[in-house]
C-alpha cells in the first residue's frame, strides 16, 4: 500500500507533513516512540529541503510517499531542486565540537542516519529522491 | 508552539507548549537569549507540554551549553516525555543535559549543583 502527500516549501507546512506521516504509521503496530523517530527522520529531510534547497520559496513543492515492503517501510521524498546532495561525502559532526562552538545546526542528517536502516539519495530524470528505509519484522508492517 | 516565561523566586522558568521544530525553535532561542541578557543563573525548562522536538530544537539547547557552563548557569529540563527523551538519547544529549522528573526535583538539582 502506498500513501502520497504533496507540500509547498514553507516551514509552516512541516506540521502537516508530520501529521501525514503519523497518520500513516498509526496503521502499523508501532510504539509512540518508534512512530516519533520515523516522523522525525522525514521531518529533518523535508525541513532541510525547504530551507536549504528551496530557500522557503512557497511556489516550489516537494512530494512524499510512504509504502510498505515485505520487510519494512520506505519513505521517498521527491524534489525537483537543482542541487543533488552528496550523501557519501557527508560526515557526521562531533557533538562535543558542536557544543564547544555553540553551533545551532548540523545534527539533522545524523539523526536520520541513526534512525533509519538505509538512507539513499538518487538522481532520477529531472528530480532527486531521498529514500529512507526502516526495517521492520513482517508482523509489524 | 507557544513559549511562556515566568519568574518563580530565583528561578527563570520557560514553559514550552507544542512542537519545537524548524519553524518555532527561534522562540526558544529568544527566551534563552533573554535569560542570558537578564543574567539569569537558574533556568528551568518545563517540557510537560512539549509534544515534539527536531534537530532545530535540539540545536538551540546545544548552542547554549558551553556558554552556560562558562557562566555557571544551570539549565534543567523537567517533565520530558518518553518519546522526547528518546530523541535526546539518539545523539547522547541526555548525557549533556540535566533532565529532572518534576519541577520540584529540577529546583533541588539547581540548588544542589556546586558553585565553581
Image (tube, rainbow, N blue to C red):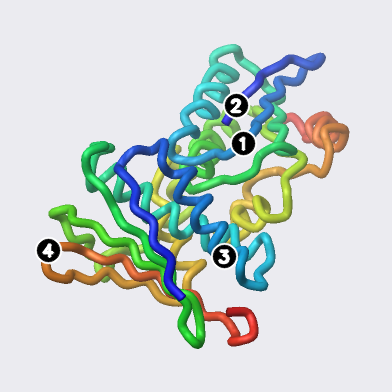
Above or below B112: residue A86: below
Which mark is nearer the camera, 4 or 1? 4
- Work out which quarter of the rendered image holds the C terminus of chain B and state it: top right
Label ID, residue B2: 2
Dot placed on the residue nearer the N-terminal end, 2 or 1 = 2
Residue A104 visible in the displayed image: yes
Query: Which residue appears at 26% of the width and 48% of the height?
Result: A61
Quarter of the figure with residue A86: bottom left
In the rendered view, does A79 fall on the left or right side of A39? left
Q: Chain of mark 2?
A: B
Question: Under tag 2, what secondary structure?
Answer: strand
Label ID, residue A25: 3
Callouts 2 and 1 close, C-beta under 8 Å: yes
Label ID, residue A126: 4
- Work out which quarter of the rendered image holds the N terminus of chain B and state it: top right
Question: Under tag 4, what secondary structure?
Answer: loop
Crowding near the residue tagged with mark 1, few <14, some 14–19, many ≥20 C-alpha atoms within 10 Å: some
* Alpha carbon separation for disc pair 3 and 4: 29 Å
Above or below A80: residue B6: above
Viewer-side residue, A98 vs A141: A141
Query: Which residue appears at 62% of the width and 71% of the height?
Result: A28
Residue pointed to by mark 1: B18
* Alpha carbon separation for disc pair 2 and 1: 7 Å
Q: Percent from the top left, x then y, of residue B92? A: 59, 58
* Alpha carbon separation for disc pair 3 and 2: 27 Å
Label ID, residue A102: none
Amino acid at each position: 500500500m502506498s500513501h502520497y502527500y504533496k507540500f509547498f516549501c514553507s516551514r509552516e507546512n512541516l506540521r502537516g507533513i508530520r501529521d501525514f506521516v503519523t497518520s500513516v504509521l498509526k496503521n502499523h503496530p508501532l510504539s509512540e516512540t518508534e512512530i516519533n523517530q520515523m516522523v522525525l527522520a522525514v521531518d529533518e529531510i523535508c525541513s532541510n529541503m525547504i530551507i536549504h534547497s528551496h530557500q522557503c520559496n512557497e511556489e516550489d513543492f516537494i512530494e512524499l510517499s510512504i509504502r510498505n515492503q515485505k520487510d519494512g517501510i520506505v519513505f521517498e521524498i521527491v524534489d525537483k531542486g537543482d542541487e543533488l546532495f552528496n550523501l557519501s561525502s557527508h560526515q557526521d559532526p562531533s557533538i562535543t565540537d558542536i557544543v564547544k562552538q555553540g553551533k545551532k545546526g548540523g545534527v539533522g542528517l545524523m539523526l536520520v542516519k541513526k534512525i533509519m536502516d538505509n538512507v539513499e539519495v538518487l538522481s532520477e530524470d529531472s528530480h532527486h529522491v531521498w529514500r529512507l528505509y526502516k526495517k521492520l519484522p513482517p508482523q509489524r508492517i | 508552539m507557544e513559549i511562556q516565561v515566568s519568574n518563580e523566586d530565583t528561578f527563570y522558568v520557560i514553559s514550552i507548549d507544542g512542537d519545537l521544530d524548524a519553524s518555532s525553535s527561534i522562540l526558544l532561542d529568544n527566551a534563552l537569549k533573554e535569560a542570558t541578557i537578564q543574567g539569569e543563573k537558574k533556568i528551568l525548562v518545563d517540557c510537560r507540554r512539549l509534544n515534539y522536538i527536531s534537530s532545530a530544537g535540539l540545536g538551540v539547547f546545544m548552542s547554549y551549553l558551553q556558554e552556560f557552563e562558562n557562566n555557571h548557569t544551570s539549565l534543567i529540563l523537567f517533565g520530558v516525555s518518553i518519546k522526547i527523551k528518546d530523541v535526546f538519547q539518539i545523539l547522547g544529549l541526555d548525557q549533556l543535559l540535566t533532565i529532572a522528573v518534576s519541577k520540584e526535583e529540577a529546583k533541588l538539582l539547581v540548588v544542589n549543583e556546586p558553585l565553581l
